[in-house]
Amino acid sequence: MPDTAVFVDCDSTLTAIEGIDELATAAGLGPQVAAITEQAMGGKTDLASAFAQRMQIVQPNRKALAWLAERYRATEVAHAAAALRQLVEDGCMVAVLSAGLEPAVKPFVDAMAVPGMQVHAVPVRFAEDGSYVGYDDESLLVAPNGKALLCTRLAKKAGAKKMIMVGDGANDAVTVDAGAIFIQFAGVCDRVQLADRASCRITEASLQSLPALVRELTER
């Protein structure tokens, strides 16, 4: 499938957690932040404003994000690394597109050791002492249709004719508007309101079936 680009979300897709919620819980702010997350991922509030609200509340430092990278590894969804590796072996261009925080997402994905994997997440700025300064609020990944724009750019650059997005949230489903095929991963969070945008759904807490689904969808 050399003409296929497969884009995969991180939080609640490659891992069984929402990173910002984990950081908030560790800081004693869990319920407040989790409510904002669910509204945004369900498509009920603007992603950019929800992201800004959560970051203002949590303000994660460098140490907290290193801790989160370890939490991602500990909660990796079953067969996630094997599925990504198989997609690469099948000839797909594979990239993680995440509205998660780059200092945690990138080490987690890099540890999967999948050859040629691209990782796109939201950059965070720190002071010299590691304290939180801010994040890249111009990143496409915090824009409501940002994943749609970014997957289009990346697929074009790779010369891919087909785009497939795998994820759980409204910011993943919006890629359908850019011509992507949306595979809804409902094995961690089943947001049924997004089901009508999906070509298929994975309801088990495993990504083992993903390579076969991609083959089937690209052959239609």
Image (spheres, helix red, strand yellow):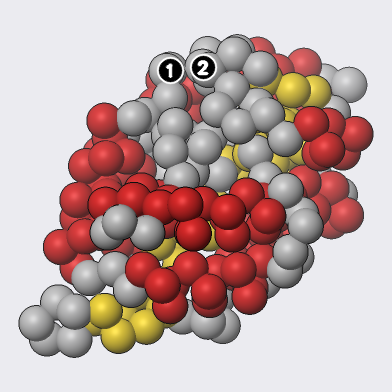
- Left or right of residue 134, residue 198 in this image: right
Asked whether 189 or 116 is in front, the reply is: 189
Could one spot residue 151 in this view of the protein?
Answer: no
Q: Residue at x 67, y 20 (%)?
A: 202
Q: Which mark is residue 206?
A: 2
How far is mark 2 from mark 1, CA to CA?
6 Å
Q: Residues within 10 Å of mark 1 (few under 14, many from 20)?
A: some
Q: Secondary structure at mark 1?
A: loop
Q: Position of residue 57 (x, y in %)?
A: 41, 72
Q: Is residue 94 left or right of residue 66?
A: right
Q: Residue drawn 49% across and 22% down?
A: 83
Sequence order check, earlier mark of 2 and 1: 1
Marker disc for residue 58: none
The image quadrant of residue 211 is: top right
Q: Give the number of marks.
A: 2
The front one of 186 and 108 is 186
Q: Amino acid at mark 1?
A: His
Quarter occupied by the C terminus: top right
Quarter of the image for residue 133 reads bottom left
In this picture, is 173 found above or below 214?
Answer: below
Residue 204 visible to the viewer? yes
